[in-house]
Image (cartoon, grey):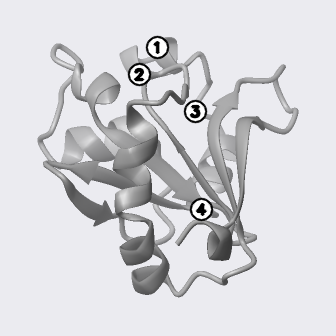
Amino acid sequence: MDTFERKYGVKEDEKTRRVHASRRMFCIYQDQLVIAEPNLPYSHAVWFEKNGWMSEQEDSFMNDAVRGIVDSEGDVYFYIGYDFRVNRQIEPIFFRHLGELVEKLGLMPDARIFGGSVKPESGKRWLPRKEYGQIKDNL
């Protein structure tokens, strides 16, 4: 198990790689929205490392950068840290970039927005910590 797997608490097996490839990652880096290429079969940590934004030795970026995903249903999740938390400090950062995210990915106005995620038992669905309604209600 690599360093990122230990910190996430999630085993990077084939099932996890399929889930990763089914969603589209994004992050807000230096107050700019960055959207990952589609179908990437790995975590934000690996994406960040490949972009040179962090390393296994220096991974504070994971706790500093607002990041998230658009799932296969078109719903949006955003969070921070290895524990997928959401707080009042990151909400305005995310919502400042929501319009651009919607435009660049062609998201539907009735798609939902969620903050944070709770890691479930292995094999179970990840549940959001907070719901913000639909995209159209937040633009």
Q: Give the camera-side residue of 86 and 6.
A: 86
Q: Secondary structure at mark 4?
A: loop
x and y percent of residue 63 in the render? 33, 23
Q: Amino acid at mark 1?
A: Lys
Q: Earlier in the sequence, mark 2 or mark 3?
A: 2
**Front disc: 3 or 1:** 1
Mark 4 — residue?
23
Q: CA distance from mark 1 to mark 4?
A: 21 Å
**Front disc: 4 or 2:** 4
Q: Secondary structure at mark 1?
A: helix
Q: Amino acid at mark 4?
A: Arg
Q: Earlier in the sequence, mark 3 or mark 1?
A: 1
Q: Earlier in the sequence, mark 4 or mark 3?
A: 3
Q: Earlier in the sequence, mark 1 or mark 4?
A: 1
Mark 3 — residue?
12
Q: Amino acid at mark 2?
A: Phe
C-beta proximity under 8 Å, tags 2 and 3: yes
Q: CA distance from mark 1 to mark 2?
A: 5 Å
Mark 2 — residue?
4
- Identify the residue at horizontal 29%, vertical 37% (top origin): 65
Q: CA distance from mark 2 to mark 3?
A: 9 Å
- Identify the residue at horizontal 26%, vertical 42% (top origin): 48
| In the depicted structure, whether residue 73 falls above or below residue 29 | below
Q: CA distance from mark 3 to mark 1?
A: 12 Å
C-beta proximity under 8 Å, tags 1 and 2: yes
x and y percent of residue 56 in the render? 24, 19
> Relative to 85, is 64 on the left or the right?
left
- Identify the residue at horizontal 49%, vertical 78% (top origin): 102
Mark 1 — residue?
7
